[in-house]
């Protein structure tokens, strides 16, 4: 039995009808990428929110951003998508412009916004089922992420600092247009001490762990790999066998229940 998977925009329109609201407001980077099919609205890499907002009503779609960002956003990110651009000067209050645009309407928002209905968690559920195009993009991203981590593991040398390892990994991603959303590196005893070890100036002796969260098109692919110089100590060898057994059990129990198709 086939399951029809709606496009992101179709999901939003259905959400508007189901919730009996007038529209949806997106400010988060992840949601901007999702609704636009992979475009981006950020300048600073470390922020959750972008510089361009999207407001979707049943009859119109708007993008609200500053005048200095407007041309690039409209020409490089929103071409052919049917959005009407609203720009303001850099010193003007973007929230006020959004409020004026949405005045008198019941709007659901993915961020805390005065006067809007905060249903960010419910909005995020619309992204749980991927379209075929998103699946292909995620497959490409996951393969690139895995290759980047594994090639870094093969190329690193004893004596490298964790900073150097992280930089080497990041360079493989950035040149592919992939954002290294998270890079964790731990060497030797730090692997066993900390759950989320950010890189430090510590130098690699024998054992390294590399963790990557790679972001592109609003999708994030995660990969973790370990590398050890010389023969494995018994405790690490035992852990490798346990992890392999868990991985086999998980993959053996995984099933694809239906064929997905886009509308």
Image (cartoon, helix red, strand yellow):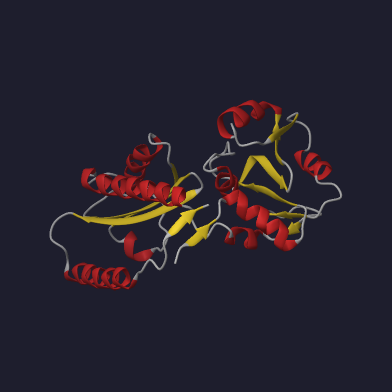
Instruction: Find residue 249 and report its horizontal and vertical position in percent.
Output: 29, 73
Question: Front-most of 229 and 4?
Answer: 4
Q: Horizontally, is 187 left or right of 63 in the view?
A: left
User: From the image, which quarter does the N terminus lie in?
Assistant: bottom left
Instruction: Find residue 162 and report its horizontal and vertical position in percent.
Output: 34, 47
Instruction: Find residue 184 and report its horizontal and vertical position in percent.
Output: 39, 52
When asked about the image quadrant of residue 11, the answer is bottom right
Query: What residue is at 78 percent from the left and 38 percent from the top?
Result: 93
Residue 239 vs 147, above or below: the answer is below
Q: Is residue 201 visible?
A: no
When asked about the image quadrant of residue 253, the answer is bottom left
Q: Horizontally, is 168 left or right of 52 in the view?
A: left
Instruction: Find residue 26 and report its horizontal and vertical position in percent.
Output: 66, 48
Residue 97 vs 240, above or below: the answer is above
Query: What residue is at 61 percent from the left and 52 percent from the top?
Result: 10
Query: What residue is at 78 percent from the left and 33 percent from the top?
Result: 92
Question: Front-most of 123 and 50?
Answer: 123
Q: Horizontally, is 188 left or right of 222 in the view?
A: left
Furthest toward the left, the residue is 231
Total number of numbered labels? Answer: 0
């Amino acid at each position: 039995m086939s399951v029809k998977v709606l496009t992101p925009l179709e999901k939003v329109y259905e959400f508007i009808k189901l919730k009996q609201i007038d529209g949806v407001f997106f400010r988060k980077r992840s949601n901007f990428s999702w609704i636009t099919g992979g475009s981006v609205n950020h300048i600073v890499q470390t922020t959750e929110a972008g510089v361009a907002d999207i407001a979707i009503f049943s009859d119109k779609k708007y993008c609200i951003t500053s005048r200095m960002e407007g041309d690039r956003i409209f020409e490089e990110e929103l071409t052919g998508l049917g959005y009407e651009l609203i720009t303001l000067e850099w010193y003007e209050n973007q929230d006020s412009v959004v409020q004026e645009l949405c005045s008198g309407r019941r709007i659901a928002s993915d961020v805390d916004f005065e006067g809007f209905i905060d249903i960010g968690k419910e909005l995020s559920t619309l992204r749980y089922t991927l379209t075929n195009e998103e699946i292909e993009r995620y497959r490409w991203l996951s393969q690139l992420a895995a290759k980047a981590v594994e090639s870094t593991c093969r190329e690193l040398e004893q004596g490298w600092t964790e900073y150097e390892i992280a930089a080497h990994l990041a360079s493989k991603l950035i040149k592919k247009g992939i954002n290294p959303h998270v890079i964790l590196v731990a060497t030797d005893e730090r692997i066993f001490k900390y759950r989320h070890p950010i890189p430090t100036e510590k130098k690699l002796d024998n054992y390294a762990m590399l963790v990557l969260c790679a972001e592109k098109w609003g999708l994030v692919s995660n990969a973790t790999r370990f590398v050890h110089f010389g023969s494995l100590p018994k405790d690490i060898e035992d852990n490798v066998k346990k992890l392999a057994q868990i991985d086999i059990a998980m993959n053996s129990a995984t099933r694809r229940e239906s064929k997905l198709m886009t509308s």
